[in-house]
Image: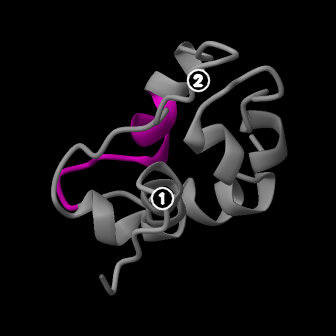
Amino acid sequence: YASEQEYPDLSKHNNHMAKVLTPAMYGRLRSKQTPSGFTLDDVIQTGVDNPGHPFIMTVGCVAGDEETYEVFKELLDPVIEDRHGGYKPTD
């Protein structure tokens, strides 16, 4: 399937992952995985399954192993920065 067909509908989700993930980013990251086999779909599944509460912003993604932070940094760095009020990888 094309990435546009597999991209989840996040229009009603209130979490940091849904705020950051774009169809283009999904297309770039969806074929990547960590050495232990953790994929983008594994990273975002909890945020797809749990849209969140309108007044409580959740994270919406998980890291399955330490390599997740490097392999999926395009998604995770902005999520972490947003969740922690501006914390950057260089901090």
Element class at badge 1: loop
Q: Which mark is residue 85?
A: 1
- The picture quadrant where one finds residue 28 is bottom right
* Amino acid found under the numbered disc labelled 2: Val
Q: Which mark is residue 73?
A: none
Q: CA distance from mark 2 to mark 1?
A: 23 Å
Q: In the rendered view, tell whether residue 63 sits above or below residue 73.
A: above
Q: Residue furthest bottom?
A: 90
Q: Which mark is residue 48?
A: 2
In front: label 2 or label 1: 1
Q: Nearer the viewer, residue 60 or 6?
A: 60
Q: Residues within 10 Å of mark 1 (few under 14, many from 20)?
A: few
Q: Name the image quarter holding the C terminus.
A: bottom left
Q: Nearer the viewer, residue 31 or 81?
A: 81
Q: In the rendered view, tell whether residue 9 sits above or below residue 49.
A: below
The colour style of the image is one colour
Which span of residues is magenta-colored?
A: 35-45
- The picture quadrant where one finds residue 89 is bottom left
- Residue under the image location 58 percent in, 23 percent down: 48
* Amino acid found under the numbered disc labelled 1: Gly
Q: Nearer the viewer, residue 87 or 30?
A: 87
Element class at badge 2: helix
